[in-house]
Image: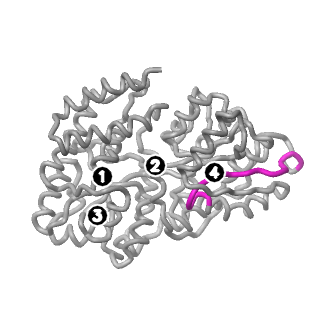
Amino acid sequence: MKRFLLSFLILGVVLAGCSNKTSSGNSEDDSKEVAGEITVWGWDVAAATFKETVEMFKEEYPDVEVTVEDFGSGDLYEKLTVGLVSKGSGLPDVVLMEDERIPGYVNQFPEGFLNLSEMGYEEHSDLFNDAKIQNVTQEGHLVAAPWDIGPAGVFYRVDLFEEAGVKAEDIETWNDYLEAGIKIEEKTGAKMLPIDISNYDGIFQMMMQQQGLSYFDKDGNLALDTEEAKKSMDMINKFYESDIVLNNSGWDGIVTATVNGDVATVPYGVWYTGTIMDQAPDLKGKWDMFYLPAFEEGGTRYANVGGSSLLIPSYTDNKNAAYAFAEFFTTNDEAQLLGFENYGLFPSLKSTYDSEVLTQNSEFFNDQPIFKNFADIVDEVPKINLTKDYAQVTKVMANTQASILMENKAVDKALADTIEQLKNELKE
């Protein structure tokens, strides 16, 4: 999913406090102990960010040589799995991983990654929001260092809203959103939102998180028979039956709909700003955002889409240098903001949110402080339980969504059948 992080954005950087120097937590004298060579794995713009951060890191750790290897995300996970199965053969010292994949890897390879809590990373926990920390915590300890996140909102076409006589500030609930979508479709011909019906249940995931759930509850039990799940899928079905959904094909379909004006809104993570700016430069000033609608007035309007973190395989020959890199990269304001400046990777490090680039108005987005608006809700995003089976359930739920929207299967029946299917598939 993170492949959509295209070339983006801006940046001016401010170092927090009087010093932003990080400490390794591995020894009392890092200048003597942190040395040697490490390899870091990433993909696309993430790998590019690592490469641009190396010189900054070496100013603090001059005795560490860093090699960054760039793979496609699929290739990276395949090589990582092979290396872990073979007890470390060919593995890097630091590896990037999407948060939703972390529980699965840690469960499958419980001895495969270093316990970062034991290495001292706990002291940084307060630098990040609770939801992100929960994503990188397994069995009560930190297994990954937080990097980027994706607080969610609804991107909308200001001109289409004005043409239809719809005001974004009047949309407080999903029912309001539905009514606005019907009106916009009637007045402009544009659908309200794109959904890749057969392949991605992103709207459902956002709706569940704003109600405090993922596919699972806090105890790890499937939460697909809950009122929250039924309410979410019922609402998505209403969108479809009201003919305000554009059934797109994959990531390219969403981008095409955005560029062509086929949709009036795109509910997504903050990182989508970069895609809009890069792919639709002629629409400068015609896009803005509002927070996700709630299910009822006064309800939670916040969720997160995407995000990744850094893990250290336990087979590393240089855990001190590996830890120093992961710690520096994720807790240094300048390093975190570099990824935002060049690639639109929204930092999880909260001390960056006071920087000018994250608080100023954006001429492209209706002259509004769009990034500040996203930063303001980071601490409001509900914590959810990303279990080892999350990725597998995602695939199944896309089929469930398709059966409801395209085959007219009743929501209750579809969710019940999905639970039975998953009970068999997820048996240990």
Q: Which of disc 2 and disc 4 is earlier in sequence?
A: 2
Residue 196, numbered circle? 1
Q: Give the foreground label among 1 and 3.
A: 1
**Position in image of residue 159 (x %, y %):** 23, 72
Q: CA distance from mark 3 to mark 4?
A: 31 Å
User: Which of the 4 image quadrants contains residue 82?
Assistant: top right
What's drawn in magenta, residue-wise? 32-47
Name the disc covering residue 156, or none: 3
Query: CB under 8 Å between callouts 3 and 4?
Result: no
Q: Is residue 338 left or right of residue 155?
A: right
The residue lying at 52 percent from left, 59 percent from top is: 345
Label 2 belongs to which residue?
A: 306
Q: CA distance from mark 3 to mark 2?
A: 20 Å
Sequence order check, earlier mark of 1 and 3 = 3
Cα–Cα span, label 1 and label 4 = 33 Å
Secondary element under disc 4, as helix, strand or loop, is helix
Q: Which amino acid type is marked by label 4?
A: Thr
Q: Which mark is residue 411?
A: none
Q: Look at the picture and state if 109 lies above or below 209.
A: above
